Image (cartoon, rainbow, N blue to C red):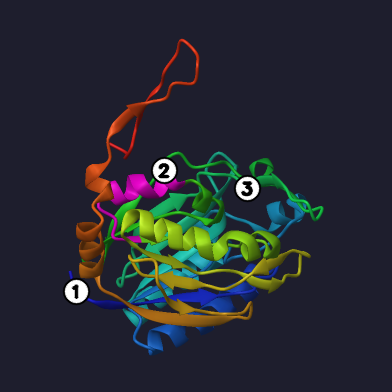
Amino acid sequence: MGIFKAAAVQMRSGTSPERNAADMEILVRQAAGQGATYVQTPEMTGALVRDKEAGAAAFTTEDKDIVVATARRLAKELGIHLHVGSTAIRRADGKLANRAFLFAPDGAVVAGYDKIHMFDVDLDNGESWRESAAYEPGTEAVVTDVNGTRLGFAVCYDLRFPQLFRAEAMAGAEVLTVPAAFTRQTGEAHWHVLLRARAIENGAYVIAAAQGGLHEDGRETYGHSLIVDPWGRIIAEAAHNEPAGIVAEIDPAQSLAARRKIPNLKNARDFTVNAGTSEAPRLRGAAS
């Protein structure tokens, strides 16, 4: 496992997949020019479209998607691992998936991940979101190899479910990823602390490319793309909501060092919950 440079590119995706793909290309090229061999884009790189009918018209199948085609071409041309944080993909059954893709330096798809946890919330500023009304949730966590390092997938709202990250860490992930489109309100409250917590809990790097600013569909996202080291230190940040890229070195040995200092993954134990009922579910302190 060797040291490599990773980049997170911050975007302000609009409603046009063609325009967003062009914006992605500019930022990815800039990141590769800074020496990044792994580049991550945000959740919904392809388009942020709040209107369900408009979204249905904008989104297509993987083989026809312009973001997928552009990312495949860029990965091969630049010789990098390119991680499309997610884009909306129409599945064979006609339903939509909020899907991440990881492209290898030869342009092949190394792995894909469908967002598991749907953002169905009502915020106190009047914002209401029902992701499950448009997207079919995934059912499988994914860990794969990048540059000899194990990398685990997540998307945005997944960040609030620590059991997903623990399961990936137990499966060997030294780098955890959280491409996102956090709302401004929730980002201001929880973005930094949750990303740092996931890094600390699992002794892993966390790379989180974000959407930022006021989008065409009316939503406002927080930005502040981050790269956090396994000790919970922020080692790169886009400290604003404008389109940009951040780059940092990833040293897998630092994950091993953090886990040796605080061996909580190894020390986890099974336990039961006494909730005052006759049923006591048996749980695990770490995923098996």
Relative height, residue 28 to residue 33 (above, below): above
Is any part of residue 147 visible from this angle?
no
Name which residue type carries label 2. Answer: Gln
User: What span is colored magenta in the figure?
Assistant: 162-175
List x then y, in percent, for residue 68. Answer: 49, 65
Farthest residue, direction bottom: 33
**Callout 2: 10 Å neighbours few (<14), some, many (20+)?**
some
Q: Earlier in the sequence, mark 2 or mark 1?
A: 1
Q: Name the one closer to the observer, 213 or 239.
A: 239
Q: Is residue 172 magenta?
A: yes
Q: CA distance from mark 1 to mark 3?
A: 36 Å
Q: Nearer the viewer, mark 3 or mark 2?
A: 2
Residue at image coords 19%, 74%: 2
Query: Viewed as shown, does residue 258 lie left or right of 167?
Result: left
Instruction: Identify the secondary structure beneath mark 2.
Output: helix
**Residue linked to disc 3:** 119
Location of the C terminus (image quadrant): top left
**Residue linked to disc 2:** 163
List x then y, in percent, for residue 37. Answer: 32, 78
Relative height, residue 279 to residue 155 (above, below): above
Q: Nearer the viewer, mark 2 or mark 1?
A: 2
Q: Is residue 78 magenta?
A: no
Asked if labels 3 and 1 touch by Cβ distance under 8 angstroms, the answer is no
**Callout 1: 10 Å neighbours few (<14), some, many (20+)?**
few
User: What secondary structure prevails in the magenta region?
Assistant: helix
Query: Viewed as shown, does residue 278 lie left or right of 184?
Result: left
Name which residue type carries label 1. Answer: Gly
Q: Name the one closer to the observer, 259 or 223.
A: 259
Q: CA distance from mark 2 to mark 1?
A: 28 Å
Q: Name the one closer to the observer, 258 or 144.
A: 258
Name which residue type carries label 3. Answer: Phe
List x then y, in percent, for residue 249. Answer: 32, 79
